[in-house]
Amino acid sequence: MDNLTKQAFAANCIYLDNAATTAVDRRVLDAMYGVMAQGHIGNPHARHHVFGAAAHNSVETARCGVAESISAQPGEIVFTSGATEANNLAIKGIASYLKSEGKTHLITSAVEHASVLEPLRELEAQGFELTILGVKPCGMIEADMIERALRPDTGLVCVQAVNNEVGVIQPVEEISEMLQGRDILLHCDAAQALGKTDFDVSNRVDFASLSAHKVYGPQGIGALFVRSDKRQLLSAVSKGGGQESGLRSGTLPTALCVGFGKACSLLEDDSRHLRGLRWSFLNRISCLKPVIYGHSHPEWNVPGILNIRFKGIETESLIMALPDLAFGVGAACSSAGAKLSHVVRATTGSEQAARESLRISFGRFTTHQEIRRAADLIIEAVEDIRELQGVA
């Protein structure tokens, strides 16, 4: 397929995979271009000359923007390459402190992102004890479920703010309140919460991971919030020039930082638009009787993430039948190829359910016209497959 054909195909394709990555907002692109086009070629860590100082100032302005979006202080923001690196830095970086304190029991949920589960399993292989808690059928883990698993040597609890596959909002504030006074650290993967909920760090999480490309910013930049009184407990995972107060070495990408800061300044309440899209889509495909995963109450789900299943139809069949739709299968970050959703497996206990689930995720730029066309294409595809299968 040549480039012109690819471009024509993409122009007709409807993008419904915003939970994987969002389009960069034009205003973010303009801010990044302004940095790159105005001769800000300096290394932001070379503040002794005018070029480096200009880049440094741009980075620090961006840091303030990210911090403000979650009610943090600028000094509590550590720039990373994304939420995956931030999750690894929080979990692996606290390991030495936990071991020195004899706090070697870790708790998490079965529906966490792989970039949380895998570092925790790595610590388990190094001698830590890991408890992975099951969740309710809606995908939620509640504070009392965690409380029952606590031990005197529990040192770290990792709970995401919003699930990336079924859109469930976890009760982080209740979990934080339950942990108060217990000398247990709380890490929160908030990559899917920023811009979708009113997430902020005033709920006393100790570490929170963020990602720019989930909020209409550029790929390749994220951040770890480190509460100021916990910074001394964290060790760097990679060594080098000691940037980011020694926690994350490497030259910061000025334009990407600026893009992240700008994206945070543009965060707005899209829930009304997204709930309208969700209602319109579900209403239109109701004739197919889809199974919908996640929490049914709007207070506990983000409207832009919808995980659905058409019983008897494996997702692979729908991928082949719907070349004009871009939707999610499992976790987009899991590998070069799609993996079955461990989240759907954890909430249903069914391998087949995971084989038949797909994620539709709307965004700021998704239109009602696109939703109607997408629904009609899905109806046609499902009905055709069921006819071939001999299912009425």
Image: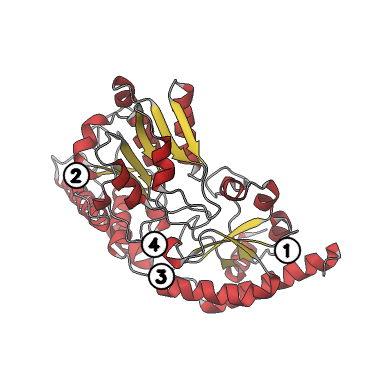
Q: Are marks 3 and 4 in contact (CB under 8 Å)?
A: yes
Which is nearer the N-term, disc 3 or disc 4? 4
Task: Estimate the spatial distance between the alpha carbons at disc 2 and disc 1, rounded to whole Å.
Answer: 50 Å
Residue nearest the observer in this picture, 237 or 275? 275
Q: Earlier in the sequence, mark 2 or mark 1?
A: 2
Q: Which residue does the numbered mark 4 point to in the structure image?
A: 196
- Look at 24% across and 32% down and name the residue there: 246
Residue receiving disc 3 = 271
Q: Which label belongs to residue 75?
A: 2
Q: Which quadrant is home to the C terminus?
A: bottom right
Quarter of the figure that contains the N terminus: bottom right
Tag 2 near tag 3, CB within 8 Å: no
Marks 2 and 3 sit apart, C-alpha to C-alpha, by 30 Å
Q: Earlier in the sequence, mark 3 or mark 1?
A: 3
Quickly name the residue at label 1: 321
User: Which one is in front, 366 or 115?
Assistant: 115
